[in-house]
Image: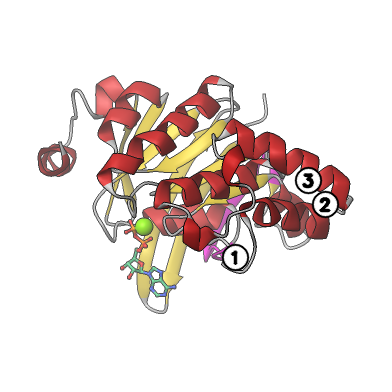
């Protein structure tokens, strides 16, 4: 079977600073993998290497069996299969929720306006903000904005969704709505790679938890293994701080 994501000996330098020091892991289709670890450990850089927002310095990255790091790779084709949700939502402030979800469909997938609108409305409905479709981001709560951002990614029919601390910028009372949408996606079989500090989500929804520290993977296993019974002192000390 083809892995959804396969990373082999991935290294990333920023100047002399080696931020990823030989990462190996895979995500299987339909799996939810949560990446946890201290600030600065390389979690965002790892995620960004999976859709080439960062260029790996060394090593190989495959998405659905296609090597992104191959010199002849069709990067745009692979990127179209990968949805990404950021901590800071990154919606266009001058476009309504509906327009935010339509624009990439029209520009990147060449969908007609009518088709893009149908798909946008379906996805806004799915994440529970259909009634906000004509609002501008500035009029929405953080939780609503993040759900629009998820709808925008889903409208592109991605094979894989990347989430980089999607709830870290939210007021505590808004976190649950976003996690509920992510949980629903997971239950529907979406392949997801999620950087998060939400240990409850990691424990209940993830098939695997990966603990990173200092640019390496320290532990990789089921939530019961990595969160419930960590083997490394570095993992234990991190968990003591976040749990
Ligand atoms: P995390 O997401 O785990 O907090 P990051 O992947 O954001 O960690 O960052 C890992 C390290 O890489 C940090 O030391 C950070 O300063 C550095 N870094 C990240 N992005 C850049 C960049 N664009 N240029 C230079 N250094 C960077
Ligand atoms: Mg980060």
Disc 2 versus disc 3: nearer the observer: 3
Residue where numbered disc 2 is placed: 109
| Contact check, label 2 and label 3, Cβ < 8 Å | no
Q: State the residue at coordinates (52%, 35%).
A: 192
Tell me if residue 218 can be seen.
Answer: no
Q: Quadrant of the N terminus?
A: top right
Q: State the residue at coordinates (59%, 65%).
A: 92
Residue where numbered disc 3 is placed: 117
Nearest the viewer among 191 and 213 is 191
Label 2: state its secondary structure.
loop
* Neighbours of disc 3 within 10 Å: few (<14), some (14-19), many (20+): many
Q: Mark 2 vs ligand 2: CB under 8 Å?
A: no
Disc 1 versus disc 2: nearer the observer: 1
| Contact check, label 3 and label 1, Cβ < 8 Å | no
Q: Quadrant of residue 150?
A: top right
**Residue 92, label in figure:** 1
Dot placed on the residue nearer the N-terminal end, 3 or 1: 1
The span picked out in magenta is 53-66
Where residue 199 appears, as percent x and y from the top left, is 26, 34
What whole-number distance in Å separates the C-alpha atoms at marks 3 and 1? 17 Å
Where residue 195 appears, as percent x and y from the top left, is 39, 45
In the visual, does 126 lie left or right of 219? right
Dot placed on the residue nearer the N-terminal end, 2 or 3: 2
Q: Mark 1 vs ligand 2: CB under 8 Å?
A: no
Residue 43 covered by magenta stretch: no
Dot placed on the residue nearer the N-terminal end, 1 or 2: 1
In the image, residue 194 above or below residue 165: above
Where residue 226 appears, as percent x and y from the top left, is 26, 29
């Amino acid at each position: 079977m083809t892995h959804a994501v396969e990373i082999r000996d991935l290294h990333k330098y920023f100047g002399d600073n080696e931020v990823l020091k030989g990462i190996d892991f895979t995500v299987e289709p339909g799996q939810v993998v949560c990446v946890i670890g201290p600030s600065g450990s390389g979690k965002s850089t790892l995620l960004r290497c999976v859709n080439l927002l960062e260029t790996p310095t060394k090593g190989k990255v495959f998405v659905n069996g296609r090597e992104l790091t191959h010199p002849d790779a069709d990067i745009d084709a692979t990127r179209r299969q990968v949805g990404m949700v950021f901590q800071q939502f990154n919606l266009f402030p001058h476009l309504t929720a509906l327009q935010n979800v339509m624009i990439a469909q029209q520009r990147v997938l060449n969908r007609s306006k009518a088709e893009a609108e149908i798909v946008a409305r379906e996805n806004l409905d799915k994440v529970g903000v259909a009634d906000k479709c004509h609002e501008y981001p500035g009029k929405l709560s953080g939780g609503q904005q993040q759900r629009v951002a998820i709808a925008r990614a889903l409208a592109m029919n991605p094979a894989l969704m990347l989430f980089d601390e999607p709830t870290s910028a939210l007021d505590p009372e808004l976190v649950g709505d976003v996690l509920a949408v992510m949980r629903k996606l997971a239950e529907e079989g979406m392949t997801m790679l999620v950087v998060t500090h939400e240990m409850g989500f990691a424990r209940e929804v993830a098939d695997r938890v990966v603990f990173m520290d200092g640019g390496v993977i320290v532990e990789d296993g089921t939530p019961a293994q990595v969160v419930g019974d960590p083997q490394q002192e570095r993992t234990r000390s991190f968990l003591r701080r976040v749990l």
